[in-house]
Image: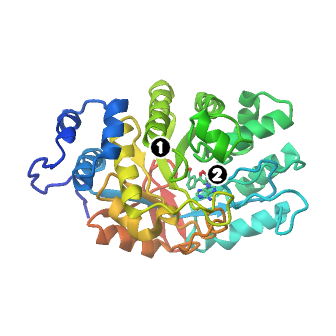
Amino acid sequence: MSVSTTSHRPRHGFQTDDPALVPIADKVQAGERLGFEEGVTLFRSGDMLAVGWLANLVRERMHGDLAYFNVNRHINPTNVCVASCRLCAFGRKKGDTGTYTMALEEAYETAAAGYSEAVTEFHIVGGLHPDLPFEYFMDLVRGLKQRFPKVHIKAFTMVEIAFLAKRGKMTIAETIDRMKAAGVDSMPGGGAEIFADRVRHIICDHKIDGGEWLETARLAHKAGLRSNATMLYGHVENEEDRIDHMLRLRALQDETGGFQTFIPLAFHPDNTSLGHIPKTTGMLDLKQIAVGRLMLDNFAHIKAYWQMVTPKIAQISLRFGADDIDGTVIEEKIYHDAGATTPQGMRRADLERLITEAGRIPFERDTMYRAVTRSEDSFTVAV
Ligand code: V47
C-alpha cells in the first residue's frame, strides 16, 4: 500500500483576533525565520488556535500527516546522584533510603524484560554516582550491544558525560570517543533544563551550566553522534528564558546540524523541593509545543513526550506542531518519582491508536527516524 504523506485538505487561510500575530503569520507563511521578540509575542498571545494553526502549517510542510513513534525501553542504572537539583525527585544521596544501583547483570536482565515487542532503542540515563567507575558504563554499553546487537543505544546526557569526564580526568572529547567505541549510537537530550543562569541557579545549581551543556553537545556532534535537546518548562522560568533557550539551541544547530529532536518537558513538582509550584496546564503544554515548532526551524522533529504531557495532550499536540510522541518506554522512573500519573509504558498498538485518532498516519521509526518493518517478534530497519 502506498501512503501519501502530504496533506490535501484545503487550507482556508490564517485567521486571528490578535493583531500582533499578523506580521508573524506573514513570516511563517513565507518560510522566514522568527526572532526573539516574535517568540515572546507567540507565548503571550491569547489566540492559541492561531498559534497552533501556524505551527501545524510548518509541521505539515515538513512531515505531511506522518506521526512518528518508536518501540523503546528506558533503563536508569542508578538513582544515586551527587547533585541535589531542586527540580528532581529521582536522584538520592548515597546511603539514603530508596537508593539503587543495578549490577551489570541486572541491567542486562532489565533490558531483556522489555524485549517482548522487540525494542529498537535503549534509552539510558541515570544519576551522577560518586563511585561507579568509568569501566562500569563501558561494560554496560558493551554488554548490551553484545546481547542486543540490533538495538540502538541512546545513552547518557551531556551532564553525565561532563561528570564522567571530570571524574575520570579525561577531556569531554575523549570521554565521548570512548563511549562511542563501546557502542553508544546517539545521545538523549536531557539535562538542558533552562540555560539562563538565573533559573539554573534555582532549579539545578549543581549541574554544568548552559554553556557547558551546549559545548558538550557541540563535541558530541563533532564526534559524529546525533543527540536530542530538551527544555524543562513550567517552573520559575519566564517566556524570555524559554525563547533564549530555544534560540541558543537553534544557533548550535545552525553550526552542527547534530540535533534530531526538540523535546519540551513539562515540570512535575511532586516530591521535589519545588513542590509548591503548580503543575503545567494543557494550554501551556500545547503553546510550548507550537512555539517550539515555530522557533526551531532547523530542527526536523518536535516531540510531545506522552509520559510528560499525558497521552491526551500528546495526541492533540499532533495538530499543534508535534510530529513525534516518543515510544513504548516500558518502565519510566524519573517523572513517576515526581508524581506523574501516566502509565509507566504503552504498547505499540496504543501509540498507533492515539496517532490514528488524531487523523495522522503512524510511522514506526528507529532512533534515526528510519522506517521499521516488523515480522513476528523481530524487526528490520530501512536503510
Ligand atoms: O533532564 C527531571 C527532567 C530529564 C523532573 O532524548 C523532570 O529522547 C519534569 O531528558 N519533572 C530526563 N522533568 C529525561 C529526558 C528525556 C526524556 C524522554 C526522551 C528523551 C530523548 C529525553 O527529565 C531531565 C530533566 O529535565 N526531569 N525531574 C521533574 N520533576
Seen at 10% across and 48% down, the residue is 13
User: For this rendering, which residue is in front, 283 or 302?
Assistant: 283
Residue 150 visible in the picture: no
* Residue where numbered disc 1 is placed: 238
Residue 281 seen in the figure: yes
- Residue 103, placed above or below residue 289: below
Q: Nearer the viewer, mark 2 or mark 1?
A: 1
Report the residue at 41% width, 49% height from top: 302
Residue 57 location in percent, x, y? Answer: 23, 47
Question: Mark 2 falls on what kind of element?
Answer: strand
Quadrant for ligand 1? Answer: bottom right
**Foreground: 184 or 299?**
299
Q: Is residue 199 above or below residue 356?
A: above
Query: Badge 2 local density, few (<14 within 10 Å), some, or many (20+)?
Result: many
Relative horizontal placement of residue 354, taking residue 267 as reference (left or right): left
SS state under label 1: loop
Cα separation between marks 2 and 1: 34 Å
Q: Quadrant of residue 28?
A: top left
Q: Is residue 88 left or right of residue 299?
A: right
- Name the one closer to the observer, 295 or 109: 295
Indicate the quadrant containing the N terminus: top left, top right, bottom left or bottom right: bottom left
Q: Farthest residue in the top direction?
A: 255
Residue under label 2, please give it.
153
Picture disc at residue 5: none
- In the picture, measured across the screen, residue 262 lies left or right of residue 28, that is right
Is the residue 92 above or below the residue 213 in the image? Answer: below
Residue 126 place in picture, x, y as percent: 73, 54
Inspect the image, locate mark 2, and give the three-letter code of the amino acid beneath it: Ile
Callout 1 amino acid:
Asn
